[in-house]
């Protein structure tokens, strides 16, 4: 028996462009067929012959080969649309590769999302069983771990309550708790750690760490380079669907940062494909404004504004806009919602704009990326969500008013502070 | 914070690693693929849970809950009895018309429910399909099984009606499970085709209510198949629901003649529907996650 867990050989995946809108109306097919029966036949014959050539296609993955040994914890990093999720989908058998093959040695569990199959009308208990079964657990296995799952999620009191009455935090905790108790030899995890509050994220990271110590194989996709560095010895760096780096996480992350080539400053978002959400509202433009002009960089500590132009197709009631600032390693440093300010936006329709003014950005010099989202009050349903919508640079400034420019060396932020020399006698705590 | 006991799970993990690990090969499939029914069997618990979810959610979301299951065929029976039984005087072969139509509606409701639910099942479970692997056949099958609960509830009423009208069920009632199975197979055959087509062509689901209505009048629900001349009856059996509905009446009410020849033709049609449906579905399912 070899100690191989996963072997990928020349995996490639081709999508037709706009595959999501590809489904057509039967009506069109029938009317087409009636109008010009022969052309249609000829076309379909040609297409079946050469695998849809002539239609615009895109290779989401190309010639991806790698091996993962039993017990290895491997991180996968890369920008949006680099093919990370497609690779996980292929390994978890959700979609087929167009070329190449993969061999998986052992039972696989995949967590591409927490709470898959959760139903709002069902109680916590019912959802645990349903979700467990969906993830591939046996009923007996779920029953055996039931108490452990409930304790982990800290929802003992509400276990017989329909989850529609849960807070979003409770909902996420329960969803993750079920997933965390999935005991397969190989675990494929996609960005599920990016949910919940900080304390819960820590708990989740701890759980993944435990899984790794168990000697199980884990593949972890994340934008959070710090989490990857903490958990994975080895990482793969995907770029434009190919492996651009494979080795020690430290080195791979360095390479990723060195090749980072994000859009900087204001730009048009209407054509961006890298977005999530249901689409009732779309961001069309993002602008950074400082000192009354469009800018790409801001001096540390100086006020700037983020302007988000949006377009909605139908009236949307009380949407919640949010903006987050991420470090280049994918750590969220700051996130703010319109709802944090009890801002009721009423019903919005058509084109519009929201502006967030950051009066004193306590960021040290370096590059930061901006994420923007708009969702409903629950913040679970998102209309539009753009990661890395744009980025900006913070320039060195005399942030402490000491006449010295402060550069970022070990830290990312600065706090209002002052130093003074004092004596031991002044202690108030002894 | 509660202490999570990991000791037990450690042992389990080690025990699993000790065994010979199964090797799974993931590669592009070419042409027609096998049905992999043994894998489906392996996922039977998921099948059960999804069916159970559908039932539970439906009863929680509807104000009338369980009453729906009875009201639908009951109101159908009332309308049919008044208009077809009393006013149009449609012959019911000596069986009281309410019982005659209710026994058919019992069968019909299960079928109508099954094909409408299953045809939309794949698109309706988009989240599951794009996020988790399991045999895709589980989805339409589960949606059909969920209809059996309504059926069981509506069935209680037919027993009551049989007592009321003094109809003694004979040994024939033992054949009823066979007709139910046959009906489910028909519904699955149709459901597999429609659900896979619905992924590609989203207007399929708008055609389903029409199909259901059209099909009902093409089946002997409000009338008796004896209206069809005897020599044409086997041909009438090309509609498998004709065999099922008359089979229900024969098994429950002892209605003659037994749907022999008609049923034989229906069996053939169902076999073709089911096998072709399974093959088509299996062939299309590899694209579900990309297209849904």
Image: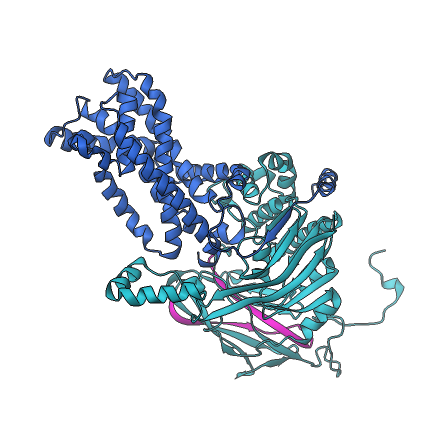
Chain colours: A cyan, B blue
**Residue found 46% across the figure and 44% down from its top:** B137
**Residue found 75% across the figure and 81% down from its top:** A402
Front in this rendered view, residue B284 or A135: B284
Q: Quadrant of the N terminus of chain B?
A: top right
Whether A156 is among the magenta residues is no
Residue A144 drawn at (x, y percent)? 64, 34
The part of the image, by quadrant, that contains residue A89 is bottom right
Residue B237 drawn at (x, y percent)? 26, 35
- Asked if residue B80 can be seen in this view, the reply is yes
Residue B109 drawn at (x, y percent)? 30, 35
Seen as rendered, the residue at the extreme right is: A424
Q: How many marks?
A: 0
Front in this rendered view, residue B244 or B133: B244
The part of the image, by quadrant, that contains residue A324 is bottom right
**Residue found 24% across the figure and 66% down from its top:** A35
Q: Quadrant of the C terminus of chain B?
A: bottom left
The relative height of residue A254 versus residue A148 in the rendered view (above or below) is below
- Which residues are drawn in magenta? A349-377
Front in this rendered view, residue B206 or A348: B206
């Amino acid at each position: 028996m070899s100690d191989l867990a996963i072997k990928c050989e020349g995996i490639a995946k081709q999508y037709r462009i706009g595959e999501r809108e590809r489904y057509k109306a039967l009506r069109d097919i029938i009317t087409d067929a009636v109008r010009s029966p022969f052309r249609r036949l000829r076309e379909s014959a040609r297409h079946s012959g050469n695998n849809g050539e002539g239609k615009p296609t895109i290779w989401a993955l190309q010639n991806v080969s790698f091996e993962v040994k039993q017990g290895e914890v491997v991180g996968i990093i890369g920008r949006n649309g680099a093919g990370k999720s497609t690779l996980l989908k292929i390994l978890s058998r959700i979609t087929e590769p167009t070329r190449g093959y993969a061999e998986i040695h052992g039972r696989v569990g995949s967590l591409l999302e927490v709470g898959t199959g959760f139903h709002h009308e069902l109680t916590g208990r019912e959802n645990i069983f349903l979700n467990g079964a969906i993830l591939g657990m046996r009923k007996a296995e779920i029953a055996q771990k039931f108490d452990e799952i409930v304790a982990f999620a800290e929802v003992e009191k509400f276990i017989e309550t329909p989850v529609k009455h849960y807070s979003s935090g409770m909902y996420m905790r329960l969803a993750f708790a079920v997933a965390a108790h999935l005991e397969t030899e190989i675990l494929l995890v996609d960005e599920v750690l990016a949910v919940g509050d900080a304390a819960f994220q820590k708990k989740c990271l701890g759980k993944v760490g435990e899984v790794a110590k168990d000697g199980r194989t884990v593949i972890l996709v994340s934008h959070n380079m710090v989490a990857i560095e903490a958990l994975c010895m080895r990482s793969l760096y995907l770029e434009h669907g190919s492996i651009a780096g494979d080795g020690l996480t430290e080195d791979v992350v360095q390479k990723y940062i060195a090749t980072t080539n994000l859009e900087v400053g204001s730009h048009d978002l209407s054509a961006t494909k890298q977005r999530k959400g249901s689409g009732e509202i779309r961001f069309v433009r993002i602008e950074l404004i400082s000192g009354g002009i469009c800018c790409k960089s801001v001096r540390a500590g100086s006020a700037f504004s983020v302007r988000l132009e949006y377009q909605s197709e139908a009236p949307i009631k009380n949407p919640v806009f949010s903006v987050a600032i991420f470090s280049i390693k994918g750590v969220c440093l700051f996130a703010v919602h319109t709802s944090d300010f009890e801002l009721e936006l009423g019903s919005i329709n058509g084109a519009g704009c929201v502006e967030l003014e950051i009066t004193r950005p306590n960021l040290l010099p370096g590059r930061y990326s901006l994420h923007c989202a708009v969702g409903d009050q629950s913040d679970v349903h998102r209309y539009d969500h753009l990661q890395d919508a744009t980025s900006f640079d913070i320039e060195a400034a005399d942030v402490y008013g000491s006449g010295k420019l402060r550069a970022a060396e070990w830290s990312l932020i600065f706090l209002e502070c002052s130093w003074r020399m004092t004596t031991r006698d002044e202690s108030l705590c002894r | 914070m509660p202490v999570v006991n990991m000791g037990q799970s450690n042992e389990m993990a080690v025990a699993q690693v000790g065994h010979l690990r199964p090797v799974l090969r993931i590669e592009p499939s070419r042409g027609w693929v096998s049905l992999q029914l043994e894998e489906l069997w392996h996922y039977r618990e998921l099948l059960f849970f999804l069916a159970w979810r559908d039932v539970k959610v439906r009863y929680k979301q509807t104000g009338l809950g369980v009453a729906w299951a009875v009201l639908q065929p009951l109101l159908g029976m009332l309308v049919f009895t008044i208009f077809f039984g009393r006013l149009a005087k449609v012959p019911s072969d000596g069986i009281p018309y309410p019982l005659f139509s209710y026994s058919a509606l019992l069968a019909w409701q299960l079928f109508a429910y099954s094909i409408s639910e299953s045809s939309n099942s794949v698109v309706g479970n988009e989240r599951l399909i794009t996020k988790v692997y399991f045999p895709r056949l589980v989805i339409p099958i589960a949606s059909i099984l969920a209809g059996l609960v309504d059926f069981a509830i509506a069935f209680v009423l037919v027993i009551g009606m049989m007592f009321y009208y003094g109809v003694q069920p004979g040994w024939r009632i033992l054949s009823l499970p066979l007709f139910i199975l046959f009906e489910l197979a028909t519904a699955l055959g149709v459901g597999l085709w429609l659900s896979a087509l619905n992924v590609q062509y989203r207007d399929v689901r708008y055609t389903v209510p029409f199909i259901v209505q059209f099909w009902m009048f093409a089946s002997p629900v409000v009338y008796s198949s004896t209206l069809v001349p005897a020599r044409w009856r086997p041909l009438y059996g090309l509609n498998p629901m004709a065999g099922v509905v008359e089979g229900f009446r024969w098994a429950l009410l002892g209605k003659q003649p037994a749907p022999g020849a008609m049923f034989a033709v229906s069996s053939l049609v169902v076999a073709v529907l089911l096998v072709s449906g399974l093959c088509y579905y299996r062939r299309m399912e590899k694209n579900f996650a990309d297209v849904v």
